[in-house]
Amino acid sequence: MLLTDIYANHPDASEAVIDQERHVTYGELRDLVDRWAAVLQQQGVRPGDKVGLFSKNCLEFILTYLAIVRTGGVVVPINFQLVPREVAFIIRDAGIRLLVVRERLPMEEALQEAGCADCRQITFAEIGAAPAGPFAGVPQSPGDNCSIIYTSGTTGRPKGAMLSHINLCSNAADFSTAVPYNASDKVLCLLPMYHCFAWTVCVVSTLLRGGCVVIQSVYNFKTAMRLVKKHGVTVFTGVPAVFRLLCESRDLDSVETVRIFISGAAPLGLDLGRSFALKYGRAVLEGYGLSEASPVVTFNQDGKIRIGSIGVPIPHVAVKIAGPDGKELEPCERGELLVKGPNVMLGYLNRPEATADTVADGWLHTGDVGYIDEDGFVFLVDRLKDLIISSGENVYPREIEEAAVQFEGVAEAAVIGVPDKLRGEAICIYVVPRPGARVDLKALRQYLLGRVAPYKVPREYFLVPELPKTGLGKVRKPELRKRAIEMLSENKLAGRVL
């Protein structure tokens, strides 16, 4: 199956996309994609060409993505929060010559600095207004690269994960079987479509099953609730912060049409998962994925739910926990989570060594530490790169964070390690209070002493109004680590609460 086959056979009159006041049927979607593909062909897009896509969520994002793929081109969705210098890096790395945008970007200086000043921009409006001749079909294979997703680059320059038609289509089919979706579903897409999670879970899976994508341009909680009510949304996908707001909401009727709640992009947390289930009588289905896996790997499914876990593997995807020697570990033993299946990427663009380090014998090394219990449920412990080694002991920040957010008044917590001559690394915690709450850091330390082993209890405590995050709600720990090192270099007792 090709990605553009996902919407090919649904009834012409069935609703496919709602974007504000615009309602598009499947018949209209097919015609629009072919028209936009014809315009892109006239712009010189040929099979294998990399075409950038820079936009917030909208109907045109979907049309452009599918039209690029329809021409045989390779779509490169770009995070709309990036600054020109960061965008220019991706343009150069991917060899992009055409960038499709909602509004033109001031890229001249950044492109010249990056040495790729020949990249042209074309807007949605220009594509929509251009006269289009007939679309000329091109031969394509399911194994062809059709999309490149750039990773966040929190540990260095971002890498482009090359995904094929098979990767995206099989992942959407397997995910929407596991959950499952159907043709009567209306799926709210409030997460950014440039990210693989929203694209696969909210867009591709919905179109594959003949449902309707309800688009929210930029996340706003009140707007999301209005869209749920107005359109009768049945599948609600969000990040943990959204579900925390739902837990605090008094309007229980706002989501009465929703039959499936899905959380992704960042850990939901045991406390939040239980609170939501208690309030709404339904569990949030938490899963796990990464761009290199298209992205879905595991998910809690109807009848197979364990709050606090990331679920079980979706169909046709295998997982295992391996030790440093690569050997599979026994149930409940901690090690690196490995993934194998038709969803695993083709490799990293222009980075054969990084590809070989990440995919070996068909197994994708995720860099995440976890374990599988006796019933087959997968639990994440932390990122390998976030592991703190203090006085020779392995410390996983997530365990401390989950304990800290159960302390009165704490909304969020982030734990990092900083260099320490005595211990190797010292543990620091950043704490965000709930609105109007006061957090006693000394009392928090005493509380943690009763919840985790003494060597895991942080040495430094920092109160902050908010944590720096990516567009999908992941905490930028390298930034927190840098802040802590700077503060401690000026005052070695900063953050002490003893």
Image (cartoon, rainbow, N blue to C red):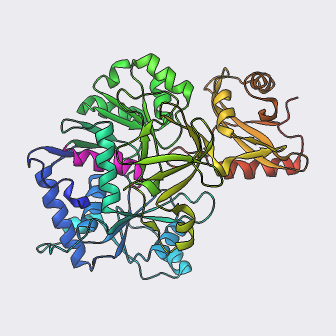
Q: Is residue 25 visible?
A: yes
Front in this rendered view, residue 453 or 336:
336
Q: Is residue 248 visible?
A: no
Front in this rendered view, residue 276 or 81:
276
Asked if residue 194 is positioned above or below residue 142 in the image, the reply reads above
Residue numbers of the magenta segment: 194-210
Is residue 316 found left or right of 425 in the rendered image?
left
**Is residue 260 covered in magenta?**
no
- Residue depicted at 59% across the width and 66% down the height: 157
Asked if residue 147 is positioned above or below residue 453 in the image, the reply reads below
Is residue 456 found left or right of 237 in the rendered image?
right
- Residue depicted at 31% across the width and 67% down the height: 143
Residue 85 lies, in percent from the top left, at 55, 69
Front in this rendered view, residue 34 or 378:
378
- Residue depicted at 65% across the width and 55% down the height: 325
Q: Quadrant of residue 416?
A: top right
Residue 420 lies, in percent from the top left, at 86, 48
Front in this rendered view, residue 211 or 79:
211
For the stretch drawn in magenta, the main secondary structure is: helix
Q: Quadrant of the N terminus?
A: bottom left
Asked if residue 434 is positioned above or below residue 416 in the image, the reply reads above
Q: Quadrant of the C terminus?
A: top right
Residue 286 lies, in percent from the top left, at 45, 35
